[in-house]
Each structure stands twice: as structure tokens, then as C-alpha cells.
Amino acid sequence: MSNEFVKHVTDASFEEDVLKATSPVLVDFWAPWCGPCQMLGPVLDEVAAELQDRLVVAKVDVDGNQKVSAQYGIRGIPALMVFRGGQLVASRTGAMSKAQLLAFVEPHLS
């Protein structure tokens, strides 16, 4: 499902892995039973590998991590959020192509 460049984040690790990260972080709020989430997985893997020096790609399973999911008002998945310097700077819901995903994150990269 994911590769070595995708970080799996939990309620317990969210602050350290996302909010305190020195690089921009793309967080995918997803669930294993979600069809569009499954379709987005390989796209995230590719982007994570290609942008590994400029972007951290993280995944949060909404079923097992309800605290952080509620904190950010996740109502539909996949929900993608870009964090930079501990702040939410962009968000979008729904699966997207690699080109769409790159266009979404590019403005927020260092």
C-alpha cells in the first residue's frame, strides 16, 4: 500500500511528525475501506518518492485516529491537507491524479 517515503502518523505522533516538521507535510486522511483512498495510494507513493527532499507525505487512518481527524474536521475522505511551519496552508477532499496532486502541493514547497 505504501512505501518507505510515506510516514504513517497517529493521534500520538501528529504533533511531532506534522506540526513540528521542518519540511512541508502533505497529510492524507484515509481509511482502508475507502475506494477513492485506495486509488490515491499509488499516486501518493510516487509523489512521496519524487519529492522526498522537499515534502513529507504522511497518512492518517481516520478509523484509528479519531482525535486528530475530529480536530481538523474531517468529514469526507480522502482529505488532503498541507501543513507548513505547523500551520494548515491548504486542503482538498477527493482523489486526484498525479498532475492534480503536484499542482496542489507545488505552491507550498520550499
Image: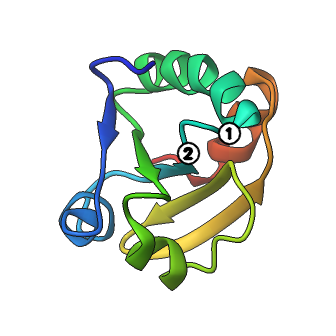
Quadrant of res 86: bottom left
- Residue displayed at 64% across by 41% down: 106
Instruction: Classify 16 as above or below 102.
Output: below
Q: Nearer the viewer, residue 103 or 63?
A: 63
- Drawn side of residue 41 relative to residue 37, left or right: left
Instruction: Classify 23 as above or below 50.
Output: below
Position in image of residue 91 (x %, y %): 69, 63
According to the picture, the residue beneath numbered tag 1 turns out to be: 34
Position in image of residue 109 (x %, y %): 52, 46
- Residue displayed at 77% across by 55% down: 93
- Drawn side of residue 27 relative to residue 16, left or right: right
- Its colouring scheme is rainbow
Kindly indicate whether the residue at mark 2 contacts the one at mark 1 (C-beta within 8 angstroms). Answer: yes
Instruction: Classify 35 as above or below 107.
Output: above
- Drawn side of residue 13 relative to residue 108, left or right: left
> Which element type, helix, strand or loop, lies under badge 1?
loop
> Which element type, helix, strand or loop, lies under badge 2?
loop
Which label is found at residue 31?
2
Q: Nearer the viewer, residue 30 or 58?
A: 30
Check the image and name the residue furthest to the bottom: 71
Instruction: Classify 109 as above or below 70.
Output: above
Position in image of residue 43 (x %, y %): 63, 21
What is the three-letter code of the residue carrying label 2? Ala
What is the three-letter code of the residue carrying label 1? Cys
Q: CA distance from mark 1 to mark 2?
A: 5 Å
Label 2 CA crowd tier, 10 Å (few <14, some 14–19, many 20+): some
- Drawn side of residue 6 relative to residue 109, left or right: left
- Residue displayed at 42% across by 17% down: 49
Position in image of residue 101 (x %, y %): 72, 35
Q: Dividing the image into 4 quarters, which one contains the N terminus? A: top left
